[in-house]
Image: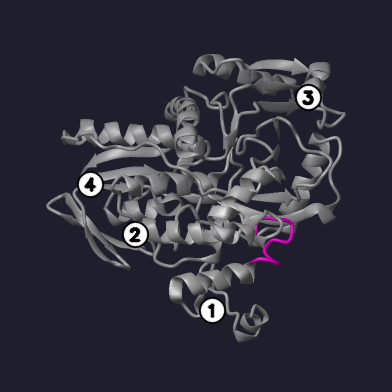
Amino acid sequence: MEKEPDVGWGCSKANTAIIHPGHEEEPDVHPLRARLCKEGNTLWRQWARELDIPVKWPGELMVFFDGEEKTAKKYIKLAKLNKIPGVRVVYRDELLQMDSSIGPSALGAIYAPTAGMISPFEAVIAVVENAVDNGVRLLTEANVREVKVVDKRVRGVETTRGFIEADIIINAAGLYSDKVSRMAGVNSGFTVRPRRGEYFLFDENVKVKPKKILHTTPTPITKGVYAITTVHGNLMIGPTAEDLPIDAKDESSTSEKGLEYLWKESEKLLKELPPRTKVIRTFAGLRPEPPEGHWRIEAHDDPWGFVNAAGIRSPGFASAPAIAYYVLNLIKDKYSVNLAKKKRWNPYRSDIVRVKGRPLQEVDELIRKNPEYGEIVCCCKTVSKAEVVKAIERMKKIGVKTVTIDGIKFRTRAGLGMCQGSFCRWRVALLISQYVGVSLHEVVVKNDTYGIGEVKVLLNQ
């Protein structure tokens, strides 16, 4: 059950997209985080291959400056405790050989070779598509209103799409996991705070693009400011780490103060920053920060059948596959239920076939088979009409109730380029209108109607 119109629109979408190695977790303080981060890093390698998810494994450099070397070196000790391979210190000369984009005041770095980067929203989509192929039912726009408990056992949930019976409920509601937990009468004092992280996203065409994952030395509340080249080729800088009030769980706006802090930190981290005219987007994501940073992953007796996967702060995305297996084993052990592996389980899923990046000969072959591959809807990202139509079909297949412009964007990348949808957004809206059978006025962007009408329709005739 997902309260948004589509999957992956919450904490999973707007983050730094790092698959952390696990050398930044203190096993004595956060043993579960330390263990599951390492396991998740390994599992993502398998999952990304099987599910055709954009990913790369460049390794990470935790850059230290004057006065920070001692603090940075403690992560080598943590790496040994957590059995993270290859973590070592590199100094100035070797550092610049690894990545020449690093700023001149850097003294050295802690190198972690197993760090990776992924496309987080595409990863969520891939996992859900594969789950539905294997028999899972997805309900979008199904906001949970009540957890029904009878005789200390869960019986189901009341949602905005009706009552759903359930013997076991897994609460993975991110920022709202504390609210859902209270609905079940569990952890009444457990609260999740929103921690805002702001970012700069630059055009693909910039001079400085790090080869490695670069970041400053961590602080008590953040893993540092990162400078990365995303899996799609954009320079991205961020995040900040700002604790917001409890009631600000939808506050994803950016701030002048936060963005200026990022700019200052990145001027130190990188030898050169692109001009601000190359910034194509600023955005903010919210992370669920639980008390003392402790994840709440528990299977409860009271009520029987209620499982928390709550307060999953960083490195939550990196750990996600391992968390899934951990929850599975909790259910087996706690409730002694007979869970059998599907005989026809299919671990594979293929991504949408794309025009961008293909040799012209292959593009010609695609167009011969389907002429819609020859009609480009998004120029920035070279997205064809065929890809948009396929995305619509896939959204309907998994059970998305409302096909949105954002849903198309996250599946095809149309609108993620330099013009941020100025060219393609209305074209995508028109295709949704035509293929879904809704009025152009009713097409949804984010959580509201786009509101374009007949004048732009006439322009396309």
Give the number of callouts: 4
Is the magenta region chiefly helix, strand or loop?
A: loop
Residue at the (81%, 53%) spot, across then down: 278
Q: Nearer the viewer, mark 1 or mark 3?
A: 1
- Residue under circle 1? 440
What type is the residue that disc 1 sits on?
Leu
Residue 98, position as x, y percentages in the image:
76, 22
In the depicted view, which residue is nearer to us: 263 or 210? 210
Which kind of residue does numbered mark 3 sit on?
Gly
Residue topped by disc 3 = 67
Give x and y (percent) for residue 229: 70, 39
Rendering coords of residue 213 (x, y %): 68, 32
**Chain part drawn in magenta:** 414-424
Label 2 crowd (10 A; few <14 / some 14-19 / many >=20) = many
Circle nearer the viewer, 4 or 1? 1
Which label sits in the foreground, 3 or 2?
Answer: 2
Label 2 to label 4, Cα distance in Å?
17 Å
Tag 4: Cα neighbours inside 10 Å, few (<14), some, or many (≥20)?
A: some
Residue that mark 4 sits on: 168
Position of 418 relative to 26 (above/below): below
Look at 30% across and 57% down and name the residue there: 183
Q: Which mark is residue 139?
A: 2
Give whichever of discs 1 and 2 has the lower sequence position.
Answer: 2
Task: Tell whether 407 sits left or right of 107.
Answer: left
The first of marks 4 and 3 along the sequence is 3
The answer to whether one can see residue 242 in this image is: no
Q: Earlier in the sequence, mark 2 or mark 4?
A: 2
Few, some or many residues within 10 Å of mark 1 (<14, 14–19, 20+): many
> Does label 4 or label 1 sit earlier along the sequence?
4
